Amino acid sequence: MINTVPHPSSFLQPEWVKTIRQDAFAAEQAGMLQPQQLELVYEEQWFKLLVPKIYGGLEMPLPELIRLEEALSWADGSLGWVITLCAGAGWFGGFINPEAARQIFADPKVCLAGSGASTGTAQQLANGYNINGHWRYASGVRHATHFTANCIIQQNQADVLGDDGSPVISSFVIDHHQAAQVPAWKYIGMMGTGSHAFTITDASVPANRSFTIDASSAVIDTLLYRYPFLQLAEATLAANLSGMSQHFIDLCGPVFEQKLKESERLTEKDRTVLMETYASIAAQLQTARDAFYQAVDASWTAEIEDEKTAATLLYPVSTTSRQLARVARESVDKLYPYCGLRAAAPDTEINQVWRDLHTASQHALLTFEAS
């Protein structure tokens, strides 16, 4: 029997939610999280959720992390997304050279923003690399202390090839002053993330700032850094969509209650359809959340030692992540027509959540079924 996962609000203190939400529209206007929001983030060390404890991070267990990130996205989509992506980059601390990691994470306001796209090159030098490239969609770029970027390794201006003949790709951490931000986020939602692009030109980067994301390359030998990156990414993104969808459903409650009280045009059948649809959608999202968290929790409590175990425990994380993402989108779309023009007004909270959910859900990772 699947235990019901509590509402996201149970994982946050009420004063946190107030601080986050009162500046949500200001964050949209500014294209970045606001000072009071960031003060809370730094105080609670949310950018360091996945940073190794040895470097002053929280190294939070995955089940606890996913619940918190869903709750933060329920509080506000942009803030939850920035924390998820930047904290996710902090997870790379488990793979970075310890000397470099101690320097990077010494900053109490450390925030790593970046991109997983391999749209840069790293020319091998005697003591490091010369990096050039342009990367898009770096959430949190406006207050990042460092950037992470994937680069094709080159030697003598030619790509270095692996045993299979494909270019060798490595990940890098670059100090923020070595990158130029490029305003590029022009979409209808998630505007508070400031997910702009960045360009790096002829940056000299030490060799110890290069790392490989693979369990066998981890330098911190704890379960968190042995957990597969794919399922970590799938689960954290799905939780964000779930949090936004739950926020939308919560906002529909008062809207529907008011409509039932004030609208003389609704027949008894209309009223029944409205409330039954609302209850059904809320139940469907809860069912998807329960299945998702059961899969995440099961994958965390057992060591992944062979392909059979991986298929049994990790594949359900991938499938339930996609199912949750789909249910989150469909839940909002099914309720939206009943909300009236208020839900279409860009200065309302319910419209902001609608825009955020439909922008965030365009992330390619959860678009197709798990392979």
Image (cartoon, helix red, strand yellow):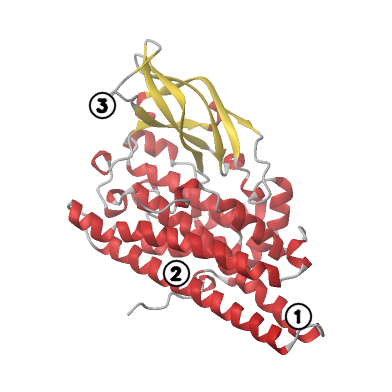
295 vs 9, nearest the viewer: 295
Q: Are marks 3 and 1 in contact (CB under 8 Å)?
A: no
Which amino acid is tagged 1?
Lys
211 vs 336, nearest the viewer: 336
Q: In the figure, 180 relative to 155: above or below?
A: below
Residue, x 27% and y 54% (percent of image)?
A: 223
Residue beneath disc 3 = 164
Q: In the figure, 258 relative to 15: above or below?
A: below
31 vs 283, nearest the viewer: 283
Mark 3 or mark 2: whose residue is earlier in sequence: 3
Residue closest to the far top: 156
**In the figure, residue 213 lies in which quadrant?**
top left
Q: Is residue 70 visible?
A: no
Q: Is residue 323 left or right of residue 138?
A: left
Q: Which element is circle 1 on?
A: helix
Give x and y (percent) for residue 231: 36, 53
Residue beneath disc 2 = 289
Q: Which element is circle 2 on?
A: helix
Q: Residues within 10 Å of mark 1 (few under 14, many from 20)?
A: some
Give x and y (percent) for residue 312: 24, 60
Give x and y (percent) for residue 80: 55, 56
Q: Is residue 25 left or right of residue 108?
A: right
**In the figure, residue 282 lies in which quadrant?**
bottom right
Residue beneath disc 1 = 259
Give x and y (percent) for residue 226: 27, 49
Residue, x 59% and y 64% (percent of image)?
A: 75
Q: Residues within 10 Å of mark 3 (few under 14, many from 20)?
A: few
Q: Are marks 3 and 2 in contact (CB under 8 Å)?
A: no
Count the numbered circles shown. 3
245 vs 71, nearest the viewer: 245
Q: In the figure, 319 relative to 103: above or below?
A: below
Residue, x 61% and y 60% (percent of image)?
A: 76
